[in-house]
Amino acid sequence: MKKEEALLRLLEKYSVETKTPINIAYGWSLLNKQLQKNDVPLLTWRANRKFIELHKIVSGDTIENVCMLRFCSFGGKKWSLDALMYKEFDLCEYLGGGKIVSLHAVLNERLAGNIIVKLDNGIIGSVEVSVQAQPEEKLLDRHEIIARRGVASDLVTDTQISQSSIYTYTNTGASKYKDVDYELFGLNELEVEYIRSAFEVYKEPSQITKLQNQHAHLSVLVKAAFESNFKKQKIEIK
C-alpha cells in the first residue's frame, strides 16, 4: 500500500476534511526553496513513538536537569547531509525544550560531520551525521539524553542498532518485520511517520504556520553549519 493511499484511507476513516489545498512534503526536501503559502514542511520524526516517549520523559521530569544531548544519524545515498542535520537540529530543540543559539560544525565534503550545538536553556548537544552507509541500509540513528539525574535513550542499553519486532528463520533465509502502527500495516517506519504527520496537519490546519516558521529556523541552522565549517568558527544564531 502506498503512503498516499494509506493517508486517504485514514482521513476517510476519521472523517477528516481535506478541502484546503496544501502541498505536503518532508521538511528537508524543501530546503533551499522559497516556500509558497500552501507549502507545508512536515517534521515527520515528531510523530515517531520513540521520540514522543523521549519528549514525555524530559517534559515530565522523569529525568531531571538535562545537560547533554548525544545524537547520531547515519544514512545512505538517498539522504543528504543537509537533510540529516535538519532532522537532528529539530530533534535537539524538540527533545531539549529550547532553541539552538549557537553551533560549531566540522564537515567532510558533505559526507559526514560533527556539530556541537548550544540551546538557549544551557543544554549542550553533540550531533554526528553521515551519508556513507550502504544504499540498502535503512537510516541508523541513536539519541541519548544525559541529565543530572538519569539518562534516556531511544535504543536499549548497549544496543547500537534498533531491533525488529519479529524475526523468522526458514530454509529461504532470515526475514524480519517491524510494524510500528496498528492501523498502517506493511509500511516502513519513515512512511508511517509521514502519514501520521500529514494526518495531523489536515486534522489541525492551525499548526501550518508553526511548521513553516520552524522550517525557516531550521534552514538558517543548516546554512549556519556550512558557514561554521567554512570559517572554522562558532556561529551565533540570531
Image (tube, rainbow, N blue to C red):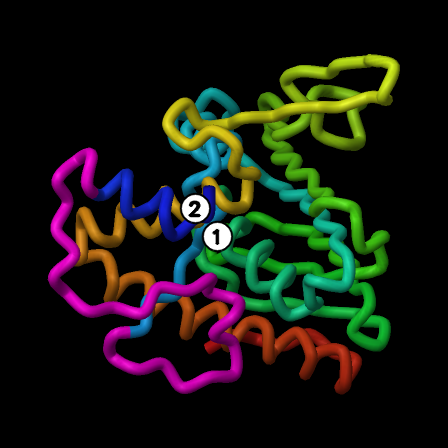
How packed is label 1: few (under 14 Cα within 10 Å), some, or many (20 or more)? Answer: some
Number of the label disc, if any, that sits on residue 93: 1
Q: Is residue 30 magenta?
A: yes
Q: Residue at x 42, y 41 (%)?
A: 47
Estimate the x, y position of residue 186 in percent, counting from the top left.
52, 32
Which residue type does callout 2 highlight? Gly
For label 1, the SS is helix
Q: Residue at x 62, y 51 (%)?
A: 124
Please name the residue that numbered disc 2 is placed on.
97
Which residue type does callout 1 highlight? Glu
Decide if residue 9 is on the left or right side of residue 143. Answer: left
State the residue in front, 111 or 184.
Answer: 184
Range of the magenta residues? Answer: 12-38
Considering the whole magenta stretch, tell me its main secondary structure: loop
Marks 2/1: CA–CA distance = 5 Å
Decide if residue 212 is on the left or right side of residue 152. Answer: left
For label 2, the SS is loop
Hey, which residue is sitting farthest front in the picture? 172
Q: Is residue 154 magenta?
A: no
Decide if residue 8 is on the left or right side of residue 64. Answer: left
How packed is label 2: few (under 14 Cα within 10 Å), some, or many (20 or more)? Answer: some
Estimate the x, y position of residue 62 in percent, counting from the top left.
47, 20
In the rendered image, which quarter is residue 115 located in?
bottom right
Estimate the x, y position of residue 105 in percent, counting from the top left.
73, 69
Q: Residue at x 63, y 29 (%)?
A: 153
Q: Residue at x 76, y 78 (%)?
A: 229
In the rendered image, which quarter is residue 160 located in?
top right
Count of numbered badges drawn on the protein: 2
Estimate the x, y position of residue 179 in percent, counting from the top left.
54, 26
For the residues labelled 2 and 1, say whether their Cβ atoms are less than 8 Å apart: yes
